[in-house]
Amino acid sequence: MKIPFLDLIAQYHSIKEEIDAVIEGVLESGHFILGSNVAAFEEEMATYLGAKHAIGVASGTDALVIALRAAGVEPGGEVIVPSLSFYATASTVITIGARPVFVDIDRDTYLIDTIGVEKAVTSKTKAIIPVHLYGQPANMDEIMEIAQKHNLKVIEDNAQAIGAVYKGKKTGTIGDIGTLSFFPSKNMGAYGDGGMVTTNDDEIAEKVRKLRMHGWKKKYFPEMLGYNSRLDELQAAVLRVKLKHLDAWNARRADIAHVYSKYLVKLGLRVPVEAPDRTHVYHLYVVPFEERDIVQQKLKEAGIASGVYYPQPLHLAEPSREFGKGEGQCPVSERCSKTLLALPGYPEMTDTQIEQVLAAVEKIL
Ligand SMILES: *Cc1c(COP(=O)(O)O)cnc(C)c1O
């Protein structure tokens, strides 16, 4: 039996009746942009997260661009980002004309190293973007302390950690702004692109609402240079259905991860470390292998898909390397980009499939 990295068809079949009904509802309503489903989904998400505002936008990348603008980051300003993340964490900083400043990650949790963050602060620093990488919350207490000390804004890149909790608070509600992605492969994926900005600040929320709609508050009277970046009604309707299943899906991901870890630790592998006072929603289950590419190839031959997140750290990527110091700047990220491999860990996986993955890894080792 082949094991995919993700099975969105199995997930659709598990909620098909609900999904088909709401899609038909949107089609019959004739309303596709910023209608009742987006408004209801924004409220449901705000309640779910415990945020004052949740504002739907077109993607997780747009959510970061809009969050940076709403936070008041201006061209030339510096923004501290981890050196291992999805590329948008750094590219969006460059998109708005600001400068990404790369900080290495912790070798155990793969989260941004807070000692490095403090060291990276200069008189030009305007914001920090902690990424809750692979589904685990970053060290928000330390990050908020550094931000307060130096008067910086904190934008949580929450694309991989929807539903994760840090000291009793959902991620995305601790900093000034949080951003979410509903890319299909995320823990709560749309049937297309989608994203969201979350905040407890009324002023920031108003700016985000303007920015997603050409800078308007009153139609056709822009108050700032904005974008066309909206979550659409079809995606919002789908996501309202999926939100009801999110906690169960996240719990299943964590269960699978714990089964993996219990077994793989006995094979001498470095299994994911869960830092204290937080939950990990295991968007990705990653393990380092010395000969990662060979392991991946052998898994493939055994019919098991796996993934590399990410094969290149941000400070070495072509469009952003001019902002970094080149090879050797972030040794942990550089090493992780060569060794980390993500095993399939999607909620619809069966126990038999989990055993099959573990048996294959053991055989390869
Ligand atoms: C997926 C992702 C994004 C971008 O989201 P899109 O919806 O694909 O634009 C940003 N940051 C991180 C960490 C991500 O994983």
Image (cartoon, rainbow, N blue to C red):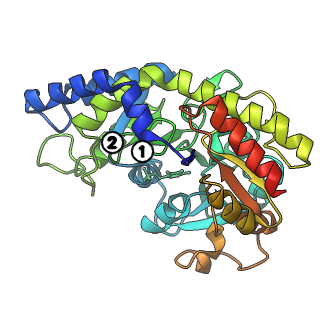
| Mark 1 or mark 2: whose residue is earlier in sequence | 1
**Location of residue 268 in the rendering, given as x and y in whole percent from the top left corner:** 92, 48
Residue 272 image offset from top left, x and y in percent: 78, 43
Q: In this rendering, would 236 be left or right of 34?
A: right
The spot of residue 234 in percent (x, y) is 23, 35
Residue kind at label 2, given as amino acid type: Tyr
Q: Residues within 10 Å of mark 2 (few under 14, many from 20)?
A: some
Q: Is residue 218 above or below residue 324?
A: above
* Relative vertical location of residue 361 with respect to residue 241 in this rendering, above or below: below
* Image mark for residue 191: 2
The answer to the question of whether label 1 and label 2 lie on touching residues, with beta carbons closer than 8 A, is yes
Q: How many marks?
A: 2
**Quick check: can you spot residue 42?**
no
Query: Residue 28, can we see it?
Result: yes
The residue lying toward the viewer, choosing from 152 and 273, is: 273
Question: Residue under circle 1?
Answer: 184
Q: Is residue 347 above or below residue 362?
A: above
Q: Is residue 90 left or right of residue 270?
A: left
Q: In the rendered image, which quarter contains the C terminus?
A: bottom right
Q: CA distance from mark 1 to mark 2?
A: 6 Å
Q: Residues within 10 Å of mark 1 (few under 14, many from 20)?
A: some
- Mark 1: amino acid: Pro
Residue under the image location 60 percent in, 51 percent down: 129
Residue drawn at 42 percent across, 48 percent down: 63
